[in-house]
Amino acid sequence: MESQYFDVYQSWKEDPERFWRAAAEKLDWSRPFDTVFDPNQGEYGRWFAGGETNTCHNCLDRHVQAGRGDEVAIIYDSPVTGAKQRFSYNAALTEVEAIAAVLKNHGVAKGDRVVIYMPMIPEAVFSMLACARLGAVHSVVFGGFAAHELATRIDDCQAKVVICASCGLEPGRVVPYKPLLDHAIDMATVKPEYCFILQRDQLHAPLRYEHGDVDLAHAVEVEKVNGTSVPCVPVQSTDPLYILYTSGTTGQPKGVVRDNGGHMVALNWTMENIYGVKPGEVFWAASDIGWVVGHSYIVYAPLLAGNATVIFEGKPIGTPDAGTFWRVVSDYDVKVLFTAPTAFRAIRREDPEGEHVQRYDLSGLRALFLAGERADPETIKWAERVLQVPVIDHWWQTETGWAIAANPAGLGLLPLKYGSPCVPMPGYAIEVLDDSGHAVANGTLGNIVAKLPLPPGCLVTFWNADARFRASCLDEFPGYYKTADAGMVDDDGYVFVMARTDDIINCAGHRLSTGAMEEVCAMHPDVAECAVIGIADELKGQIPCGFLVLKKNVNRDSNALFKEIVQLVRDEIGPVAAFKTVMVVERLPKTRSGKILRGTMQKIADGMPWKMPATIDDPAILDEISQVLRQNDMAKLAS
């Protein structure tokens, strides 16, 4: 169909308040809002001021009251344990009310903060919704985070209680969570009044009553037997729904605050218009609730829109093989899949010909969405070839909570441009500025910014740190939100996100995008994955250095391979790239959400002080990178 995007975007530009009012009317409000947008509240204005609502009501009760209670809301699939469960909206509501009753009975009330430290299990989602039901503010900490990181988050949000599982599960190992929580509480200045512990069969943890430990499953069962009913607590639209601490933080954590009203309006709008899914259809965001994708598109957006959402406790490879995603899509008739490019690079490396795809019926799959980091064109082309569906890169951040730029399947797809997440979504007026704040010409690399106000659903501030929010996001380019991403906009309005601004390197006076070089390296048929960083150089300031992960069973003369890749970059970007430094590594260091830790790699290469990132998936990889750098005298020069 012909895309409606330009008409819809224009309608937002002409009258933003009318646009978002219409979106808000699709949801339930216990008190109508006074104004769609109040520019005098908060740091840049607040959405739907004066309105009262409840996010849990709109996720569950609203659908039950509409007669859809028997439809599937949540699908749990754990290839690690073999467990599979489906929860209807009625069943999910029962579970959520029981946990809400337990929390309420232990003093949790509107505005209290609750830390949730759990793996990908249904109880984690039920706990998030139970907090929302009470008007409490949840802060999910990625399961398995180190004790120090958990302690800093408990302190920063002053958590009243913690909800924790006894353990998480990785392929081949059990990760004990409870000892990490115990250590965190011992370290923390703030001592939670209670810790609710969900005992999993794989590890029963001793309860520490001096920490106020409560057996969660037992307490929930009591409330179910009693048939306890917990009505939704009305909250202000502008009240916080959750705090999410951004990945990679060291020292004082940075807590992104999301409100109730704007958040639910924006996310509900995205499901039909961006992702193109209808109520009752199955949507799967293959991520983790510890990250923003999990908050937005495992929990809130699908349930707000009346979809079935998948909670998957597994990995793209190794549980048991590179076909596990296709098995889930086939088993549950997933209509739209959303995951990170790193997951597909891992699958592609293990199964370069897509042989596992042939084993499953994927006829129901309509689209694949990728986000979380730049999706290199070669990975997109591979996914298009093996899946035979549109593969849509889209760009957003923890701070925004939903897509800044996308190709909106629900409005009709626009022509694809590899390397671009397509066009700005309604709510985002995107511009590209130089370092002095002046607009640059189309096609020119610069700082990508969004004109204020940010749309509904974006962060409103950092938790208890308004000044830090302004300094970090608003002050450098007055009137704009600084994305801290570098890129450009072309003559057709397509956005190209090339790198974080600190990944732009200055080589002999030329501003070069490491992302552009990574795209070219990934074009080589032997390369499964790559990262390009800038290494300090006395002569040129910085020179680019490429780290390559090769596909399985590639057995090549390394010098010949390096020369081919260097020549490829020279041909595609030009000699100005000064790309001569290449080395092969077994794997790249990443956060648990799949982002490559380029900044840490750069510090190691430059001999600068660095700290172990809190979110790193496997700390041993940094030792491997250091060893490769030493073996190559910092570089393997291709002459």
Image: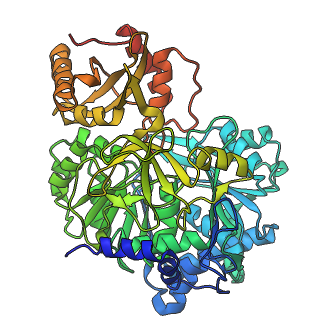
Q: Left of 469 or right of it: where is 411? A: left
Q: Residue at x 25, y 72 (%)?
A: 3
Q: Position of residue 123 (x, y in %)?
A: 58, 64
Q: How many marks?
A: 0
Of 566 and 285, nearer the camera is 566
Above or below — where is 600 with respect to 127?
A: above
Q: Left of 139 or right of it: where is 498? A: left
Of 328 and 304, nearer the camera is 304
Q: Position of residue 339 (x, y in %)?
A: 37, 54
Q: Left of 361 or right of it: where is 374? A: right
The coloring applied to the image is rainbow
Does residue 319 appear anywhere in the picture? no
Does residue 68 appear anywhere in the picture? yes
Q: Residue at x 47, y 78 (%)?
A: 19
**Which quadrant does the N terminus fall into?**
bottom left
Above or below — where is 493 with respect to 17?
A: above
